[in-house]
Amino acid sequence: MSTWEYTPGRGLAHAYRAGCKIGSGSDLLGDMQAHRATELELKGQVMTPMEVLLSATRVNAEIFRMEKDIGSVEPGKLADLIAVKGNPLKDLRVFQNADALHLIMKGGQLYKRAL
């Protein structure tokens, strides 16, 4: 009889190696929403930091077939923006530190500006 062993990231690694499009997002609710940024760090164990960032932007737009309207910062496209202190290409954990989020803009409205 075989046993099943849970290994964090195993499914993600299989999907990544198989060439699946991997987007970002979650259905976390309430207090759990505070852990949302951990997703990026966990993906970084399988994907490059640039691939992780693209999964949350361009790839999500492709999955929803909305790449003409969202997914990149270009004239005529809709975009929510953040500016962080630090380099996410070197450390994806920067998104887990609220103090590192210097600018947050959603729907054209500025929610935080500490630049």
Image: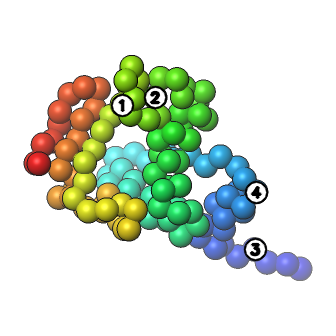
Q: CA distance from mark 4 to mark 3?
A: 21 Å
Asked if the residue at tag 1 contacts the one at tag 2, i.e. Cβ–Cβ closer than 8 Å, the answer is yes
Q: Disc 4 residue type?
A: Ala
91 lies left or right of 22: left
Closer mark to the observer between disc 3 and disc 2: 2
Q: Earlier in the sequence, mark 4 or mark 3?
A: 3
Circle 4 crowding by C-alpha within 10 Å: few under 14, some 14–19, many from 20: few
Q: Disc 1 residue type?
A: Ala
Residue at 66% in and 72% down: 6
Residue at 36% in and 60% down: 88
Q: CA distance from mark 1 to mark 4?
A: 30 Å
SS at circle 4: loop
Q: Disc 2 residue type?
A: Ile
Q: CA distance from mark 3 to mark 2?
A: 40 Å
Residue at 19% in and 44% down: 103
Q: CA distance from mark 1 to mark 3?
A: 42 Å
Q: Residue 8's mark? A: none
- Residue 62 visible to the viewer: yes
Task: Read off the residue under disc 4.
Answer: 18
Q: Residue 70's mark? A: 2
Name the residue nearer the viewer: 50 or 109. 50
Task: Read off the residue under disc 1.
Answer: 79
Number of disc labels: 4
SS at circle 1: loop
Is 60 above or below relative to 68?
Answer: below
Q: Residue 4's mark? A: 3
Q: Earlier in the sequence, mark 1 or mark 4?
A: 4
Residue 15, given in percent of the width and then of the height, sits at 70, 57
Q: CA distance from mark 2 to mark 4?
A: 26 Å
Q: Earlier in the sequence, mark 3 or mark 2?
A: 3
